Amino acid sequence: MLWNKGRRSDNVEDAGEGGGGPSFGGRGLGIGGIIVLAILGLVFFKDPTALLGQGDPGAGAPTQTQQAPRQAAGDDPQVDFVRAVLGETEDTWGEIFAANGQSYEQPKLVLFRGGVRTACGLASSAVGPFYCPGDHRVYLDLGFFQDMQTRFHAAGDFARAYVIAHEVGHHVQNLTGVFDKVGDARRRGARLEGASGLSVRQELQADCFAGVWANRSQQRLQWLQDGDIESALNAATAIGDDTLQEQAQGRVVPDSFTHGTSAQRVHWFRTGFESGDVGKCNTFSGSI
């Protein structure tokens, strides 16, 4: 991936060590087991309130003074990469929104190490990259990129770009009212978890949006190289619910799915990439 072609975003912030957040040594994340934490914490995360312990905002409060994130320096190659990819998501979604007579609100992307305090609660690096709808920010510990390679065997710059584009896809969902509609449906009794639940549908739509971004950015920059799409599809395969459950517990439990199977994640990313059409990303209608 010729990512140096990307325009650098000014919306990447560095929260530093701990991110002004808590010490996580004494307070659990409420997951209910190391295996479950390994599955959920290292997947592209949609709704951080499920892991962040938001229900008790006083527990685990930081003892240090919280510092406001500062703009991340671009002299670190990994930070420069993040800024290039985020800049291209800004350009892509800015064009798409403008074509529909709307203005795109650019999200902030916050880099942190160890833990971070967000509008959705307190998070540790264990949750992986996530989007917080409460503050319109994407959160990323760069150590996750190493985890992708060593734990998921999903190497390559474009696989990393897919991670960022997926989380930005959640921001697009937030701006277009998908989060609100999912919340309304859940309050009416619609099932969140499960093979056809709202969570899976929302995650798969974010995968499709990531594919749309890949299509549009390639048209604009011609920055993809041989093997790049395959690396993104390999990442999508590696973090499917069925694959992760089989690896962690030796069996697949569809009723507990939150992100979709490997095949579904590949299908919806490919749908977005091959069409470049947001209208093809309606995962909330019919079978998935």
Image: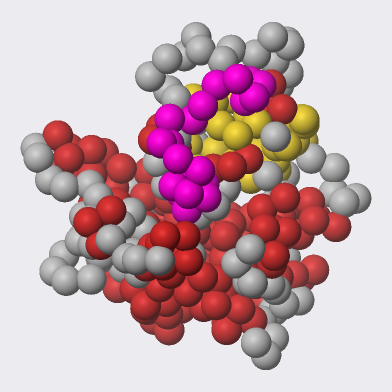
Res 133 seen here: no
Residue 63 pos. (x, y %): 69, 9
Q: Is residue 262 left or right of residue 140?
A: left
Dominant secondary structure of the magenta stretch? loop
Residue 272 sits in which quadrant?
bottom left
Looking at the image, is 61 positioned above or below residue 2?
above
Residue drawn at (77%, 31%), measured in percent from left and top? 16
Residue 229 sits in which quadrant?
bottom right
Of all residues, the one furthest to the left in this rendering is: 188
Q: Is residue 83 left or right of residue 239?
A: right
Of all residues, the one furthest to the front in this rendering is: 250
Looking at the image, is 263 positioned above or below residue 6?
below
Depth order, front residue of 265/216: 265
Depth order, front residue of 187/147: 147
201 in magenta: no
**Dividing the image into 4 quarters, which one contains the C terminus?**
bottom left
Q: Is residue 252 left or right of residue 188?
A: right
Q: How is the image coloured?
A: secondary structure
Residue drawn at (64%, 81%), measured in percent from left and top? 228
Range drawn in magenta: 22-41
Residue 279 pos. (x, y %): 29, 69
Res 28 seen here: yes
Looking at the image, is 224 positioned above or below residue 118?
below
**Dividing the image into 4 quarters, which one contains the N terminus?**
bottom right
Residue drawn at (43%, 36%), measured in percent from left and top? 31
Residue 206 pos. (x, y %): 40, 59
Residue drawn at (16%, 71%), measured in percent from left and top? 287
Looking at the image, is 205 positioned above or below residue 11?
below
30 in magenta: yes
Residue 173 pos. (x, y %): 37, 50
